[in-house]
Image: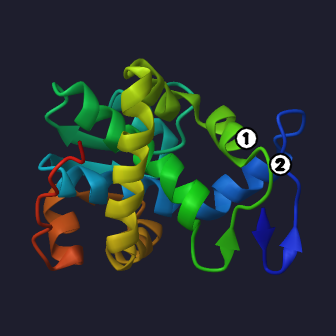
Amino acid sequence: VRQDGKLTPASPESLEGAQAFFAAVRAHHEAAHAVVALALGATVDRITLDADEAGSLGAPPRALGGVVFQPRDDETVYAKIRAAGLVQEACFGAPGVKAEGPGLWTSVCQNTPHDAAPIYALPVEARVPALEDVSRILAERQDAVNRLASELKRKTTVSGAEVHAVLDVVVEHVVDVE
């Protein structure tokens, strides 16, 4: 993990670097879930960085934040939305914070296993295309992720209506990559 020019190793043996990185990019992680949800046609009801609120909204016990979105009935769309935070961390980080080095995906997944699980539930041949699709969506929408993350840092919890107001755009649907 490179932050402010310093490299902190992250490995399966030592999650210190991954945890420091996640603390630095947590708002971007949660914002990425929301941006991908909107891009895939889901609605976003709320985003929070408050662990207690996330727990009351149904987030897994280790979650430090959460996004409430609908619908959840399409397993591929659900997996993409859940993986969005991991892809944000692995590919884009946050301004001034970038993950790098071997073992990156393993370290990131170990730090937030509840977000990785839906991707691993997909058929093997669908996993890479799903992650590539999420990466493309996020690459095209980093400005939206940054704007939403800034608002989330400022307020801790953002309603679905506020998400739309912050983004100030209607996010167009993205057709699934075959």
Q: Which of the pair 125/60 is nearer the observer? A: 125
- Residue 27 placement (x, y as % from top left): 49, 61
Kindly indicate the quadrant of the structure image that contains residue 135. Answer: bottom left
Marks 2 and 1 close (CB-CB < 8 Å)? yes
Give the SS element for disc 1: helix
Say the numbered circle drawn on residue 107.
1
Give the SS element for disc 2: loop
Graded by Cα atoms within 10 Å as few (under 14), some (14 to 19) or many (20 or more), the crowding at tag 1 reads many
- At horizontal 42% and vertical 45% (from top left) the residue drawn is 131
Horizontal arrangement in the rendering, residue 69 relative to residue 60 (left or right): left
- Residue 94 placement (x, y as % from top left): 57, 71
Query: Which residue is identified by label 2?
Result: 10
Tell me which amino acid carries mark 2.
Answer: Ala
Q: Which of the pair 120/114 is nearer the observer? A: 120
- Residue 46 placement (x, y as % from top left): 25, 50
In the picture shown, does residue 160 fall above or below 68? below
